[in-house]
Amino acid sequence: MAGTLAGKVVVAGAWRSVAAFLPDKISRFLNLNYIYVLVKLELSRLYCRAKDGDNVLDVCCGSGDLTFLLSERVGPYGKAVGLDFSKEQLLTASTRQKLRSKTCYKNIKWMEGNALDLPFPDSSFDAVTIGYGLRNVIDRHKAMTEICRVLKPGSTISILDFNKSINPLSTTIQELMIDNIVVPVASGYGLEDEYKYLKSSIKNFLTGNELEMLALEVGFSTAKHFEIGFGLMGNLVAIR
């Protein structure tokens, strides 16, 4: 269900290309701008239940949108770590951090790392988030196991991504938006091939029920998947 290793390596390479050359604002637009901003930058940070003074981790952080809001939520006495495999995205995130003045942003640490082998001790974090990243991970079971390991008991993970809906209408609308909005805009920046894979990656992703089962299987005590934006997006909330 997770796809072949070779296929996932190709996807990772494609996204390194996107990270290196795609302006951040265009990237947001290609992620269905309104839903992306509204959901990822608000609901995900609320779902993870981070609070003032917490130590939080944003896996597959990209250029840091969610990491910055997590930093605001935990405040100047908390700590936020943004982890990503892309040096280019982390450089963008670090540059953005230097241009911002809020005191809490000084407590953000950017790390290059692998979601399958998180470089942290057990029970390190009060909350973990992933925005549009789990779908592209080679071994989702291993990634979820690692996240469960680094979370403190009773803490929460919030995972936002495109939803693999079991509703044919939602699937049709989602595919129409990708074909008629995302790919055409991407092609104008020479990135058509990088974004064409979206539909196939969603088809190879897990449904909400399957994500819940995966979370429970790796050791989370509870798991609930919420469909968002008329079923176009989904958010898994799991408690260790």
Image (cartoon, rainbow, N blue to C red):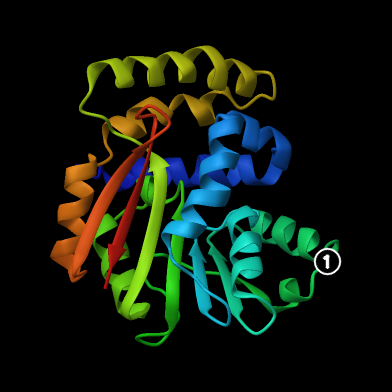
Please tell me in which quadrant of the rendered image residue 88 appears: bottom right
Q: Estimate the x, y position of residue 92 in percent, counting from the top left.
A: 73, 55
Residue drawn 27% across the image and 48% down it: 225
Q: On the rendered image, what quadrant is the C terminus found in?
A: bottom left
In the foreground, 205 or 114: 205
Residue drawn 57% across the image and 82% down it: 53
Q: Amino acid at mark 1?
A: Lys
Q: Estimate the x, y position of residue 154 in percent, counting from the top left.
A: 30, 78
Please tell me in which quadrant of the rendered image residue 96 appears: bottom right
Mark 1 = which residue?
98
In the foreground, 226 or 160: 226
Q: On the rendered image, what quadrant is the N terminus found in?
A: top left
Give the left or right position of residue 5, taking residue 103 as reference.
left
Please tell me in which quadrant of the rendered image residue 82 appears: bottom right
Query: In the image, is residue 209 above or below residue 99?
Result: above
In the foreground, 161 or 134: 161
Residue drawn 85% across the image and 67% down it: 101
Give the left or right position of residue 208, taking residue 96 as reference.
left
Q: Look at the image and tell me whether residue 138 can be seen.
A: yes
Give the left or right position of residue 27, taking residue 144 as reference.
right
